[in-house]
């Protein structure tokens, strides 16, 4: 059985889709400890990524927001006292702009800039079409060890690029049942509409059906 004191990285997922993706990217998977506290309500997956022992937890089904995430993080730290780095890794929507053209499949890593910590606190609120984003504050910047790792990743990417597609395809080849849900969709379905195109809030039809496929309404 695993020793809780061996784990130094905590990884929290908000939804099951993220939890599945996190598990399949582990280089090793470990058995759970036998002596976790009885009042710890989390569901854990333990394993190793490179040289790091990682404990992965997921929010309870149907729960979202910072209160639920804080409760999960509290139990992680209580049951795995040597965790020194906490990561919230999940899925986000596209956020294109002339300077940062963020699209489906991109990976975004927060970093401090201009006197701000790099993570916005929005208390379960999001920017929706025709509404303004109201900033309620921002969190403290990540610890130096994480910011140093980001700098190292940037340098590695400039020299060697990345092998993300190869890694994903390798996993999907081994776990074929994940393909339908986790394989990258056809590029023709990656339609990013301009801000002026409004999807009616009371219509649950697909964007292709409701908003159409007129190329003049799409971001290039």
Image (tube, rainbow, N blue to C red):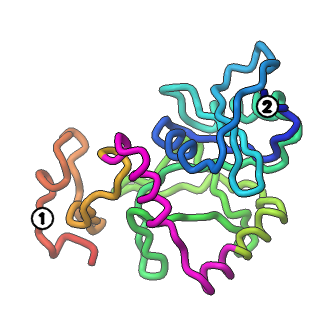
Residue 81 image-quadrant placement: top right
Give the extent of the magenta segment: 153-179
Contact, mark 2 vs mark 1 (Cβ under 8 Å): no
129 to 4, vertically: above or below: below
Disc 1 residue crowd, few under 14, some 14–19, many 20+, Cα 10 Å? few
> Element under label 2?
loop
Question: Is residue 71 placed above or below 34 in the rendered structure?
Answer: below
Left or right, 195 with reference to 135: left
Q: Quadrant of the N terminus?
A: top right
Q: Helix, strand, or loop for circle 1?
A: loop
- Which residue is located at x 24 percent, y 61 percent? 186
Residue 137 in picture, x, y percent from top left? 68, 54
At x 11%, y 69%, the residue is 214
At x 27% / y 78%, what residue is drawn? 220
Which residue is labeled 2 in the image? 2
Between residues 103 and 163, which one lies in front from this camera angle?
A: 163
Residue at 64% from the left image edge and 50% from the top image edge: 27
- Report the side of 95 relative to 88 (left or right): left
Residue placed furthest toward the top:
38
**Is residue 159 rendered magenta in the image?**
yes
Is residue 142 shown left or right of residue 211?
right
Residue 156 location, x and y as percent?
66, 79
Q: Is residue 86 above or below residue 114?
A: above
Q: Is 178 in the magenta?
A: yes
Near mark 2 (Cα within 10 A), the count class, few <14, some 14-19 or many ≥20, is: some
């Amino acid at each position: 059985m695993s020793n809780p004191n061996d784990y130094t990285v905590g990884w929290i997922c908000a939804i099951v889709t993220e939890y599945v993706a996190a598990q399949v990217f582990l280089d090793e998977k470990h058995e759970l400890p036998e002596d976790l506290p009885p009042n710890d309500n989390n569901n854990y997956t333990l394993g190793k990524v490179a040289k790091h022992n990682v404990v992965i937890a997921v929010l309870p089904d149907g729960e979202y927001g910072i209160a639920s995430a804080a409760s999960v993080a509290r139990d992680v730290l209580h049951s795995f006292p040597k965790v020194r780095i906490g990561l919230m890794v999940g899925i986000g929507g596209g956020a294109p702009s002339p300077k940062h053209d963020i699209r489906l499949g991109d990976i975004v890593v927060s970093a401090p800039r201009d006197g701000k910590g790099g993570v916005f606190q929005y208390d379960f609120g999001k920017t929706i079409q025709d509404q303004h984003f109201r900033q309620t504050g921002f969190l403290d910047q990540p610890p130096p060890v994480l910011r140093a790792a980001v700098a190292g990743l940037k340098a590695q990417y400039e020299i060697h690029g990345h092998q993300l597609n190869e890694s994903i395809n390798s996993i999907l080849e081994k776990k074929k049942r994940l393909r339908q849900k986790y394989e990258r969709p056809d590029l023709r379905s990656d339609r990013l509409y301009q801000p002026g195109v409004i999807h009616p809030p009371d219509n649950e039809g697909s964007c292709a059906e409701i908003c159409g496929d007129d190329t003049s309404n799409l971001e290039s």
